[in-house]
């Protein structure tokens, strides 16, 4: 997601080819939203991302992102049979050593991924 989302930008947020096919899409639903969770308090500048699978019209997962925190909440709208709801309950800043370990684990998991679809695999960026 871009740091300053504008307009009707729609992104591919997940893709797996057949036989397990899914093609999740995402777009900005709202910006400047007030969102409060006990783990970090309130943000008046959250972004709400609406995720959907084009085959399932009218079903949306809503993901709330606060600056400096990331994903704080997941909700839903419409005809979403899962009606998944989650709220951030704990927030921890990792030091440089802990972050390096997490990055290494993520890159290792990435190598075992089923498919990269239309995107390149994750890679370590220069610090």
Image (tube, rainbow, N blue to C red):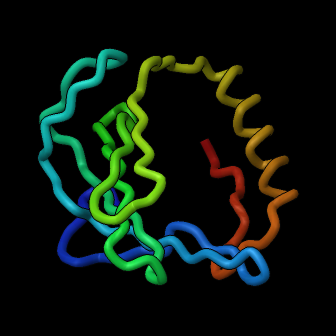
Q: Position of residue 99 (x, y in %)?
A: 65, 28
Picture quadrant of residue 106: top right
Residue found 38% across the figure and 57% down from its top: 61
State whether residue 93 is above or below residue 79: above
- The residue positioned 61% from the left and 75% from the top of the image is 22
Q: Identify the image quadrant of the C terminus.
A: top right
Give residue 87's position: percent from left, percent from top: 39, 30
Say which quarter of the image contains residue 105: top right
Q: Is residue 31 above or below residue 103?
A: below
- Residue 60: give x, y in percent of width and height: 35, 63
Observer able to see residue 63: yes
Q: Looking at the picture, how far across and down is residue 86, in whole percent? A: 42, 35
Q: Residue at x 57, y 68 (%)?
A: 14
- 123, above or below 115, in the image: above
59 on left or right of 115:
left
Foreground pick, 114 / 104: 114
Horizontally, residue 23 falls left or right of residue 37, namely: right
Residue 1 seen from this side: no
Q: 57 or 38: which is nearer to us? A: 57
- Which residue is found at the position 75% from the left and 83% from the top? 18
């Amino acid at each position: 997601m871009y740091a300053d989302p504008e307009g009707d930008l729609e992104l591919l947020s997940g893709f797996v080819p057949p036989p397990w096919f899914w093609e999740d899409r995402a777009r900005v639903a709202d910006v400047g939203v007030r969102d409060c969770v006990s783990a970090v308090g309130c943000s008046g500048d959250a972004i709400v991302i609406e995720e959907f699978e084009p085959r399932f019209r009218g079903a949306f997962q809503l993901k709330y992102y606060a600056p400096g925190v990331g994903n704080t909440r997941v909700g839903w709208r419409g005809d979403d049979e899962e009606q998944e709801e989650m709220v951030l309950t704990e927030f921890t800043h990792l030091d440089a050593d802990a972050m390096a370990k997490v990055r290494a684990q993520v890159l290792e998991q990435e190598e075992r991924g089923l498919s990269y679809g239309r995107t390149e695999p994750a890679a370590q960026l220069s610090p």
